[in-house]
Amino acid sequence: MRGRQRWAQRGLLLAAAVYSLFPIYFITVQSLKTPQEDVFGSPFYVIDPTLENYTDLFDSDAEPSVRGYVVVPRVPFVVWLLNSAIVLTSTLVVTLVAAVPAAYALGRLRPPGWRWWRRLLFATYVVPHTILFIPLYQVVLTLGLDDSHLAIVLIYSTMALPFAVWILSAYYRHLPREIEESALVEGASPATAFTRIILPMSRNVLVAAGLFTVGTVGNDFMLASIFLLDRHKQTVAAGLGVMDVSLEELVAVAGVNLAAIPIALLCALFARGYVRGLTAAMLEGA
Amino acid sequence: MAPALLLVLGVLAYPIAWEVWLSVTDFSSITGDGRRFVGLANYRKLLADALFWHASLITLVYFLVTTAAKLALGTALALLLQRPSRARALVFLAVFLPWAYPGGVTVVAWYWMLNPPITTAYSAFFGGIKHSVDAVLGGGAYAFLSVALFNVWRGSSFTAIFLLAGLNAIPTELFDYARLETQSAAQRLRAVTLPLLRPYMALAVFLSFTTAFGDLANVWMLTGGRVVFPLIGTYAYWLGIGAGRFAEAAAWSLSLVPLLAAALVLLFRWFDAPEEARA
């Protein structure tokens, strides 16, 4: 009986891994193919892997090249990657800088009606961006902020902020007050007590908030494609998302993988902290 | 507190107010700058539109189907990952990946995978599926399924990790008692684990709610930008950004508000109840 149970568990674990990884595996297989193999090979494995699809993304200044019988158009992929990195880091900074004081205020100082403030802030998360893109579009156009990274960074930050504030404030709320008090007794100023003691203590929760922000930004394609039309201002998502029929599918898929790998690595690196942070926030009561 | 509020007010409250105002005018790219107050005409037109009811129904079905699937898969994965085993760390990473793989670009790959160009080795396979699905369930069914599949694949990963964190937050003594008091694993699951997980599930449903209504990006991408089956969000996008009929699009978008408000009330009731009891 025990042995059978163990095998069942192993089988389920394997199934879970296959279910999660298969689409990514499939993408990767296609991205390593030559045009010939794309047509005549098997979709599930690659016999003659090539990195051509990846290297093609990097020489952007050349004329469209002809490879096999397909014309490969050039895209400014390096610029897109750079733009994505800029937007992602700025969003992270803005979100965390705005979320930490708000969460601390709500969780620790408890201004009158703090529960309602927190609910209100959380409710903003439910306002899906489906509802918002029309006025945002108008506002951004009126302010002349289209094709500017500033607009998209601010919008992304607002999307990620409610969740970040929510988990951080849950954590701060149940942190024993004695921690700060003992720091104050030792002669630290409230600001020092906060930056030297409270912030490091909430490291995991900060990681969780940060990763959630990364996930939010990474998931968006629509807003980027509405607000970033200049080909040299676009992020990878917006650039690949134009669905240019002439953009060859193998190169597009390679681009997807290339953009995803750094983010996936980042997430994998912090995955444990992410779960710990979420748990900490939930432990402290929601 | 101040910077967060400023950001939320600036990027959320102001546009919403503006949109409400927009929805009672006749503003579109045809009328240009001159806009006229037309009262509730846009809403009246909306309620009389058969397409609106059709879209609402599809949106609701989409939400129910994807949420149920995400919750079931997510709970199963979380429970599986909670059990100690040697491969746990690796499988945990595998389960985490669909969410970590940035959706905005992955969706491009999904599009190519499910709607391959004519020349690839697997085109015939997916083309065959598409035609048989559409033949049985009607046009647009395949697109609907592929969108739902993507949403579930990515969402179940998030839900699983989220619920795993929830499981970790539940004191282990409770599970130890449960082991003594209950007779079977199924009973334990029904009587102890699921009720304890309920607030976290409510939250997960809530987060899924916003992706079901908000993630029109996936719909947009996976259907190649065509309105194959109307969801309220995609249709509003098409009306607003595509056709320039901003006022009508605003009315379409705002029609979601009552639903969202109801969901919010439910969530706070479910989620805050145990907390109130604890305090």
Image (cartoon, rainbow, N blue to C red):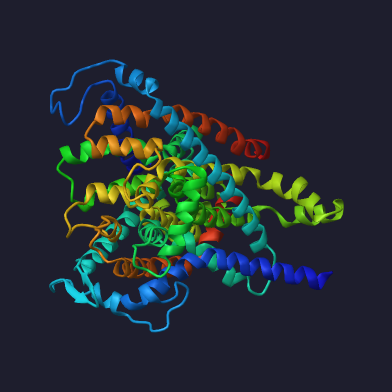
Residue B109 in which image quadrant: bottom left
- Viewer can see residue B204: yes
State whether residue B196 is above or below residue B24: below
Residue A44: image x %, image y %? Answer: 47, 73
Does residue A147 appear to the left or right of B13 in the view shown? left
- Viewer can see residue A169: no
Q: Residue at x 47, y 47 (%)?
A: B134
Does residue B162 appear to the left or right of B173 in the view shown? left
Q: Residue at x 22, y 22 (%)?
A: B26
State whether residue B18 is above or below residue A226: above
Does residue A282 appear to the left or right of B117 in the view shown? right
Numbered label tally: 0
Q: Residue at x 50, y 45 (%)?
A: B208
From the viewer's side, name the closer residue of B72 and A96: B72
**Residue extending furthest toward the bottom:** A48
**Residue extending furthest toward the top:** B39
Residue B30 in which image quadrant: top left
Residue B224: image x %, image y %? Answer: 33, 51
Residue A143: image x %, image y %? Answer: 16, 40
The C terminus of chain B - image quarter: top right
Residue B11 in which image quadrant: top left
From the viewer's side, name the closer residue of A110 and A3: A3
Residue B258: image x %, image y %? Answer: 46, 27
State whether residue B145 is above or below residue B258: below
